[in-house]
Amino acid sequence: MAAPVTTCPPAEPTRVAVLGYGSIGTVVCERLAAHAIPGARLVAIVNRSRVGDAPAPLVTLDAALTMCDVVVECAGQDAVRADAVRILEAGRDLVVSSVGALCDDEFALRVRDAGPGRLVCTNGAVGGLDLLAAAHDAAPFDEVLVRSTKLPKALVQPWMDAGQAARVRETQEPLLVFRGAPSEAARLFPKSLNVAAAVDFAVGRAGAVSVELYADPAAELTRHEVEASGPVGHYAIRIENLPSDANPRTSAVVPFSILRTLAGLTRQPNLIA
């Protein structure tokens, strides 16, 4: 008699709540609702304001934490600072897209000590971080420069006075808007320089990273250039992304970077459809 055939029951899908339903969160929710990631199911959306025709129930964060396994942050640095520790202490994993919030050392320590949930950062609009991290592990870099170039309207900030804002908005040629450390870049340009923070984390936050931000009226694409030099090599990475139609401060690729990170956390990891 043939041995009975045994099969393993299918794994339960990873239940996902999305924090933020703006230009990034909308795309993430739509793709999840369309089953773009095998093994992931959108169960809740947390947003400060009411929205119509959402593909999942709009609930409070407390309610979402009772419904989900993973929270995906698409709401900005303020939301990370306000909610990350609570999410992790509830035992939920947290995918962070606004990694600049973690440039605050005191807050980063609080997040590190929180749990049992896991925090996972996305690469966002930049690539090559695995290579930079590997090179740093071999020997710390001597210097790393992150140079970002965006349309002027994307770089006008609420803290700028009228003269500063006009100078950026009305420039007719490439204009250096900021030069400094990643932590200061993330604080002053919270929706524009998460890339600098991601590079900083990749190279171990050794103090070698400097940031330059340019406003260029001819910048049809958002450009990020990373130049790194150290004992094991010299690296130059150039990335040009289309800005999001809904929000020129972010790149259109960002929600798809988030989805790919989420795919690695599902119980049925696979390529994004």
Image: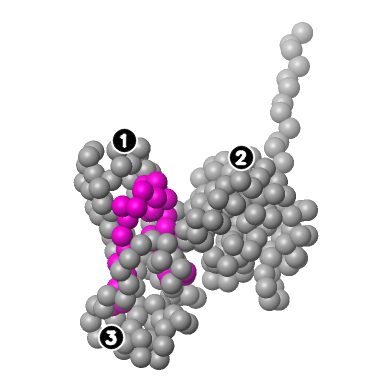
Q: Secondary structure at mark 1?
A: helix
Residue 93 is left or right of residue 150, and the answer is: right
Mark 2: few/some/many CA within 10 Å (<14, 14-19, 20+)? some
The one nearer the camera, 5 or 109, is: 109
Q: CA distance from mark 3 to mark 1?
A: 42 Å
Magenta segment: does it hold 197?
yes
The residue indicated by pointer 1 is: 138
The answer to whether the residue labelled 1 contacts the one labelled 2, judged by CB atoms less than 8 Å apart, is no
Residue 29 is left or right of residue 245, and the answer is: right
Camera-side mark, 3 or 1: 1
Q: Give me the residue at 67% from left, 73% from top.
A: 48
Q: Is residue 203 above or below residue 221?
A: above
The amino acid pointed to by label 3 is: Thr
| Residue 151 in which image quadrant | bottom left
Counting from the top left corner in percent of width and height, residue 35 is at: 62, 53
Mark 3: few/some/many CA within 10 Å (<14, 14-19, 20+)? few
Counting from the top left corner in percent of width and height, residue 29 is at: 62, 62
The residue indicated by pointer 2 is: 268
Q: Give me the residue at 55% from left, 50% from top.
A: 109
Q: Give me the residue at 70% from left, 46% from top.
A: 91
Q: Is residue 25 above or below residue 120?
A: below
Of the numbered discs 3 and 1, the one sitting upstream in the chain is 1
The residue indicated by pointer 3 is: 171
- Give the number of the disc on residue 179: none
The quarter of the picture where the N terminus appears is: top right
Of the numbered discs 3 and 2, the one sitting upstream in the chain is 3
User: What's the magenta region?
Assistant: 189-216
The amino acid pointed to by label 1 is: Ala
